[in-house]
Amino acid sequence: MSMGPPPSPSSARFYSKSSSASNDKRPPSPSPMTASNSSTGTSLMPSKKPVVVLGVCAMDVKARSKAMREILTRLVDIERGGVDVKIFGDVVILEEDISHWPPVDVLISFFSTDFPLPKAISYTQLPNRTPPISINSLSLQSLLWDRRLVLAILDHIGVPTPSRAEVSRDGGPRIPRVLRRKVRRDLGLILPGPKAKDEDDWGELIIPERWKGKAKKQPVPRGKEVILREDGDAIIIDGQIIEKPFVEKPVDGENHNVYIYHRGGGGRRLFRKVGNKSSEYDPNLYHPRTIGSYIYEEFINVDNAEDIKVYTVGSKFYHAETRKSPVVDGLVRRNADGKETRFITPLSEAEGEYAKDVVEAFGQRVCGFDLLRCGSRSMVIDVNGWSFVKGNQAYYDKAAEILSGVCQLARERKISTIQSGLPAVVADNEVGGGSTTSTLRATVTIFRHADRTPKMKLKFSFPAHEPWSKPFLRLLRGHREEIILRDTRQLQYILAAAEESSQTPGITSEVLTKLGQIQEALGKKMSLPGTKAQLKPSFEKKKGDKEKKDKKEKKEKKGSDEEDELTETEGKKKVHDWLRRGSSSGPHENPNVKSTEDKDNLSTIDETATKVSNGDVSPACAEQPPASPLELNGEPLGDDDIPEGLEKMQLVIKWGGESTHSSRYQSRDLGDAFKKDIMIMNKDVLNNVKVYTSSERRVINTAQIFANALLGLEGGSSSHSSTIAGNRNPPEPCPQISHLIQRRDLLDDNNAGKEKMTEAKKKLKILLRTGETEKRPDLAWPKSFKKEPVEVVKDVIEQLTQLRSIMRKNYENGNVEKIPQQRWCSGDSPWLFRERWEKIFEDWVGVKQEKFDPSRVSELYDSIKYDSLHNRTFLFAVFDPEGKGQNFKPGVENQDRRLHDLYGMAKALFDLVAPQEYGFDAEAKEEIGVLTSLPLLRKVWEDLNEAKTTGKSLACFYFTKESHITTFVHLLLSSGLPFTNVRIPELDYCSHCTIELWEKSSGNASTRGQKDFSIRLSISEGAHSPAVLDSNVDARHSLTVQPRKKLSSHIDYDLARQCFSKHFDKGLSFSTTPLEGDEVYLKKPVQDESVLPLSSLHSRGEETPRMISSASSDRSHPGASDGGW
């Protein structure tokens, strides 16, 4: 059974200056009135209480963020219908006149990129409409854009700041007259910068009692230029000397390029976090910048090399966290969510007062600010405006409770207004012709499956003209399509074919060795869940170069694998060696008996292979097939079963790729997140939900768990931890989903684009040519490497050569047995670990550059990521010359970061190579996209069009594998849609592309009742971390799925239809899905579309369901659960 997620921190770990504020809870809100009563000014019965309308006027990326979603969900739960949440949406905010924005009682609104702050301020000042209670003052938010203004206010209210000087080459901060006057009136402060024309006529400056006597007495030096002292260790501003080290900050609050200048030369450049870096050392940093305006502060040597981030919700509640200061080494420590690792810390009484003062002076109930501690001193260095704590359930609970208190104030104001005989809210049709609403009408999402174990495979080629190939070719049964064998009995047919082939007269020792390898591989891996074999026929082309054909036939006679371009000797050694180094009895082999039983097994394999190669004995399969080699289900096989025109057949044996225990958490949390998002945006969407899946086990598992979370049968990451509402409220209505829809024709592998993809893979070596990345700007290659890809490949080979030597030594000297790996998940073991890495070493170490296959990069990258999450202790120890790992060397400076460097190089090569496997250029990507994912694109548009035509809300979720979501995205990119971002991230596990249909109902009197539709696209890179080796993961071994990023703004529906339909007349009119073994050998029909019952076995936290269908095996691995659950 899998281990559950760790409990959320209790609310006792949060700190409030007022104990009553944290302990006294407001009584439950009264039952709500009907929506019609809330929007009219009619009088109410005393027992009826008005519904409070809470508007969220922020860009969608913020309004639909995880933190906002969690808090609003809790708020609605607390209020039991007493609050109606209205998300304004980007369309209304950016396109509609403020007179058509919906009227609200409480307003959450804050600035972010592209947000029209002046427009939002004007909305709160509309005549004939009661101004809403703003959680954060909109007018004062613009003060946060200039650090000079922020520090001036902090000085005025007595909050300590580092000593500083200012260089203003822009003439000083320019502030609107209204805002200058408001700050003068509310704070008694004259802000720096040019005065308003009539400012001298505003009368005497009066400091409110709240702020009297708090102002900082020492004046701030202000000048237009900075002078570097002759010795270079100090600067002079307005006669004031500032010694190095000092900090140079741009006055622009959105500019994070902060420099620290060290005494004697050099310094550190700080910047917004990029991957796992937040700063870097620059030895040439000497002279201050001469262009732009800056603040120069003393450098504070903080305690424990930590900064403090403080978050407030109102003036009586705050939450503080420490983080590693970016000035240390610039390396960012991350948690499983991909966020910076932080630790809760209490604030002193004085620091708590600073938090209260910041909230009241800046008018921001929800805000964050940065605090530094140095001995007994505490100083605030910046105020950030609207900020939420990330991923803390107790904080979400408290924030929702405090916001509920604000809603109660709005409710009391409404009741007071009604009792005085005035209308509570102006009706929609009385102000500017009514409000415009933007509604999420439909959402369609294509998902990649959740986390899996690494995939392994072996390939063998059988030329049609060789007599010893006939037993394998007959397995095609005359079919010209690819056939997939999954069941153990079907895999036995391959063993039987190998037995029959070995008896062919005149067979060579090299071929016998190949047959022995097939038997050895299947004998070891056949019992593993998910093991399958693919029979891939290739046919002669009508037009072809005879010389090329002769060359291929010559190569095939030697028995080489065309795709790997290896000789028979190389292929034999490669397969045999890494199989020998792996386990011989499955993943649960006892390491203590390796010296006896394993040694005997390995020596037996050696002897058998030698005898086979010498022709002394025929290879024998581990288990005898149920039928004669010359028969299949009692039917004799003959040459008639070999399809006409067959040139060769490739046999691919695959295992691995099964769902891990962490995939359960990823799928569950993703379903929970989608449910909460839809509940806020338009809960009617959940009344019409369809979930589609391919036939692969890991995909079905992901779809099952996601659907259960969407139904509320399997709680999400936060469903268990909301302590505010408890169980007092009835559950929200859940979508009615009774089954999954399996669509093999839409979501399974198909053969239509395989030939083009093979051509693309053959061109991958071009990427390693010198200068290729400079010629093609579309290629992702980090400039920070300062090396060509071919040089990085050489570095990787050198690194892997060293690591192979270290790993083998640790296995030989027994260090492996001393590694304290707490548990092996997903059926893994030290011997399977070795098998995986030996396969990687064989693909890289000692390979000549002209024979290096760039497609092998993905296997290396995949294995590093997998072991970093699931076997990190073992990974670091087994590649440590001492066999201990980093965790057992405390206090050692300059820790070995070879694995970090290897991961960085593998990641860069993967980002370069992987997208080109689905088309080497834009034209090829489009062609492969059409051949692979056009049916899915057609179905997606049908879903969107159905919602538009019928007016019924719907949600469709499609679950598939990496190849399908990648080619689907490539097809979108080639459609001509106006994308705002065409740089597609790595599509990791649980990555997804969402297409939403939005319906805008106009509030303009001239267009009343008119509905406009638009499409918006977004994409998530999935469960991904830019620095997986530095990410802190718990027992779930799970990375959090990253939020979606905008791919496009709202696109007019007609334009979207034109772009989507660009390819609709292309593609194939028939299915090219591979045949299943059941169809070929059991004559059992397998439909492209079928229904799978939705399992509900998760109520007890049991393992993920093992789906049994015509396309999945019922084999189980002895002693191991499915995927390790």
Image (cartoon, rainbow, N blue to C red):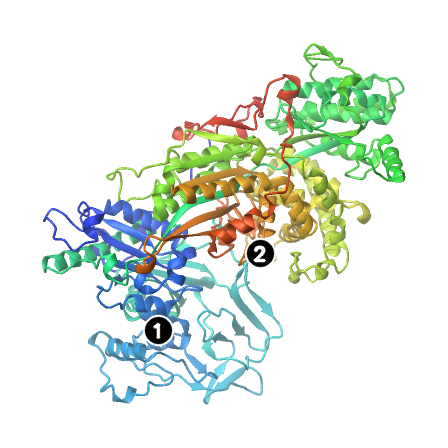
Q: Which residue occupies the foreground of this view, 843 or 683?
A: 683
The front one of 188 and 59 is 59
Work out whether 396 lies above or below 140: above
Residue 456 badge: none
Q: Answer yes or no: do the residues labelled 2 and 1 have beta carbons within 8 Å?
A: no
Where does label 1 land, which residue?
160
Residue under the point 57% across and 23% down: 1110
Q: Where is residue 923 shown, x and y percent of the image?
A: 68, 51
- Between marks 2 and 1, how big is the CA–CA gap? 45 Å
Name the residue furthest front.
1006
Q: Image height check: is 354 above or below 414?
A: below
Mark 2, other Cα within 10 Å: few <14 / some 14–19 / many ≥20: few
Label 1 Cα neighbours within 10 Å, binned few <14 / some 14-19 / many ≥20: many
Is residue 293 visible to the viewer in this orientation of the structure? Answer: yes
Q: Depth check: 74 or 39 in front?
A: 39
Q: Amino acid at mark 2?
A: Val
| Three-letter code for the amino acid on which mark 1 is drawn | Pro
Along the horizontal axis of the image, is 108 left or right of 990? left
Task: Identify residue for label 2.
Answer: 982
Residue 45 position, x and y percent, is 10, 48
1089 over 414 or under it: above or below: above
| Farthest top residue in view | 634
| Nearest to viewer (mark 2 / mark 1) | 2
194 vs 337, left or right, is: left
* Residue 282 drawn at (x, y percent): 60, 70
Residue occupying the point 34% across, 85% down: 195
Classify mark 2: helix, strand or loop: loop
